[in-house]
Image: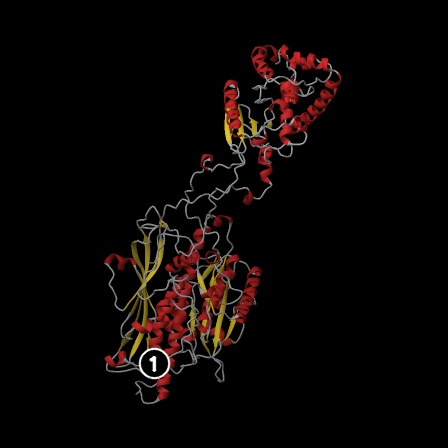
Amino acid sequence: MAAAAAAGVSEPPMVEQVITEFFAKSLHIILESRSPYDSSRNFTRPSPPSSPLAGSQPRDRWFNLALRDCPAALENFDLWRQSNLEPLVIDIVLLQRDNTRTASVGASRIIERWVIKYETTRSGNVIKNGGKKARSSSSQDHSLYRRAYSGSTVLFRSLYLVVRLLPAYHLFQGLNSSGRICPLSLSHKISSFVEPFTRAEDAEMKHYAFAPIETLFGSLSLSVSYVPVLELAAVPEQSTPMPPELIKDYVGSPTTDFLRKLDSLPSDGIAPACFPVTRRHSCSTEHGVRPSASPFPMSSEPHGRLQPRMPTDNSLTAYSNPHNTSSSGKKRNTVNEECYPSPPLSPNHPSHSPSSYPRNPFFRYESAPLSIPTVMAGGGGSRLPPSPRRKDKQQCSSQNENLTHSPNDKSILSKDLVKLSEFQNEKSLQKVLSFGNDDLMYFRGLKLTRTSSKLFIMDELDERELVFAWEDKDTIIDQLRRIDISDREDQGPSQEVGGSLTRSPDAAIGILMRILQNAPGLRERLLLPGPSSPVPQEPSSLQRVVTEEHGSRASSSAGVPSALLRSRTAADALEELNKYKEIKESILNRSKGHPCSTKLLEEKPADGDP
Amino acid sequence: MNCETCQLKELELEPTEIRDVLRCILHTIFFHRTLSLVRPKDVDCDFLEITYVQCGLPELEKEVDEKIDQFTAWVEKHPNRRSQICLSFFDEKQTPSPKRYSKSNSSKGLTNIGANALEETSTRRAALESSVNEVLFQIINFANEKKDHIPAIPDRIFNHEIMIPRFLGLCCPGPIHSSRHLGGHLSSKLIPLILEDT
């Protein structure tokens, strides 16, 4: 071959084959444990015809060491490998990216250099057991071949182990197993000349050389220079979004029923859709490891994509360690096996404040507890009549008649009540707010919820949200007026509910409102021996109720029993509605039979309601 | 008798570390002496940051585990004692007397770690890792430097024998020849635990 010819002597063809395969096998073993991007194709190219093993042994089985994966560099090895006399220099380079978002490479450092050489000796090697032999007999050639082959076999056993004992292997393992985007990556450079190290680099390096394999006219040598300690600097970890978490005490009081219910629910179903659902340790095809300490200047953005530099490698595919799948009963390091989870890349997790949470439309972010189950159920659908549609809401005149309070419901007349209504002659705007702290009521399609200090009026269709200060009744009235004006503009012909209030939710609500409107004052109710009969009132009566409340609140508040202060729930409201229905029917029946009694009842609310 | 002997560095181990370290060393020796076609298998030590290589032969793994179990059982009965494992490879040539062409011994000293040593577990573990690395490189160097005595590559593993201490006062049972190659370790076996580099 060319190598021997240049030296004036030539090795036997079989030995030449061993020499050629020696270089290839060395490259294979080294890159297999240093380059995470190499091909995983099974290389089964047959041996050249000149080899005694031609056709019987695939290349990966040379030297009785079966390696499954074939580095991509090896595929073109024979093409660019001109001569066995040229040394094969494999530099393992530790690369650091400047920017995790770009492929730009920052610092690079050679952490290992493998040098495989075939050096000829003109005089030839003295073969034991007889001295120098002439290449006359094929048996001698075969003997030489076997010696070179067996010696190489043992050497490659050692090489296979040494590459795993050197510090770079742990780095390779971390890069190979971790799918995270990391600032560091391993690359390799193959050349046929030895670029000398600097003094500092050389002083830092340690050297190890394998025993040379002697051939007839030369020797094969393999050596490595490596950095004994790879100190990788701590890198500021990339801030990763927190995984979705359930903050139990974020909304309102921790004692909120809804929040307690959430404890029993899987977190997957609770996390709001707008949360950034990203895994803390996401796997990707990138290879990198979070360094712990290093003299390398590290960028503040450690993550990014980096492709290895390979002179002949054009295909970058995922590298799979064949030894992980070699046989059953194997034991693997936790680093290699665990892709999930990987060590946290960033110790500095973003401080997560409640304000950074995206708002859940189902939650009302208020300080006071809310009747959230009612909200989640679509506004208390199970407990209250569903919200009437806006266009079905014209029930003013007929609703007024039935809008009375239950005579037995003292909670309505608590000191927290704010009765507010505004009636007009033709189309009344009934905005009676007479519910407790946790009540949810519907009024003409408006969802009324009240906290301890604020009143929310939301139109479910428009999702308008009017927040009123509890004490600012004038503001409430004005805004409700505006709502009414806008409603009237959109509404079609009014719908007479009248006697059909029991048939539609709108009607039921209208009736409720009417009952509440016509309910007698607290004082009167307390004084009355029996259930008070709600009396349909004129629209203006509610205005009088509000006006009188200003004056009578101070005087009546002292006398309000404590029982009236109990909070009302949707169930209570529904119960009250049913009572009102009964009262209404009784009134209707009574009015038919006794028209004079209705007049008396009409006068009583004017005496000063609380 | 042509027998190459390799005396490995003595190691001090906790009882929980015996199995891991023994498997690492024994399989490394077998990997260098199994010259038939093998598909190597990487194995990571449980307690050490070391990756060693097995031949990928289930029968061999089973044999090694069995011997280690026997050794471990012996150690449990004889705590705080130095003990030795001898691994020998034989040539199958038809000769009047079997030749041990290669032998690697691993000497181990055992000690019970007291409560005070627990505080230095990480330091001790790092030192043990360094020592095991030294032992592995000892095997590598010996296997690469001493190759002339290795016969032609067979199509199977060389005949071998793993000898563990079984009898009190006797290091390795077997032919008297073996005692010659063990050197002075027979007599040193019963000496109280003393760490020394050989």
* Front residue of A476 and A417: A476
Q: Chain of mark 1?
A: A
* Front residue of A86 and A229: A86
Quarter of the rendering containing residue A136: bottom left
Task: Indicate the position of residue B38 as horizontal and vertical percent values.
Answer: 46, 73
Q: Is residue A171 left or right of residue A383?
A: left
Q: Is residue A184 left or right of residue B94?
A: left
Task: Indicate the position of residue A556 as horizontal and vertical percent values.
Answer: 61, 12
Which image quarter is the N terminus of chain B in? bottom left
User: Callout 1 environment at 10 Å: few (<14), some (14 to 19), or many (20+)?
Assistant: many
Q: Is residue A567 visible to the viewer in this orientation of the structure?
A: no
Task: Indicate the position of residue A525 as horizontal and vertical percent values.
Answer: 68, 15
Q: Please say if A325 is above or below A50.
A: above
- Amino acid on which disc 1 is placed: Val
Which image quarter is the C terminus of chain B in? bottom left
Colour mapping: secondary structure
Residue beneath the point at 57% across and 10% down: A551
Indicate the secondary structure of the residue bearing disc 1. helix
Would you name the residue on which mark 1 appears? A15
Quarter of the rendering containing residue A414: top right
Q: Please say if B41 is above or below A435.
A: below
Task: Indicate the position of residue A585 as horizontal and vertical percent values.
Answer: 72, 23
* Front residue of A66 and A413: A413
Q: Residue furthest right?
A: A593
Residue beneath the point at 58% across and 39% down: A262
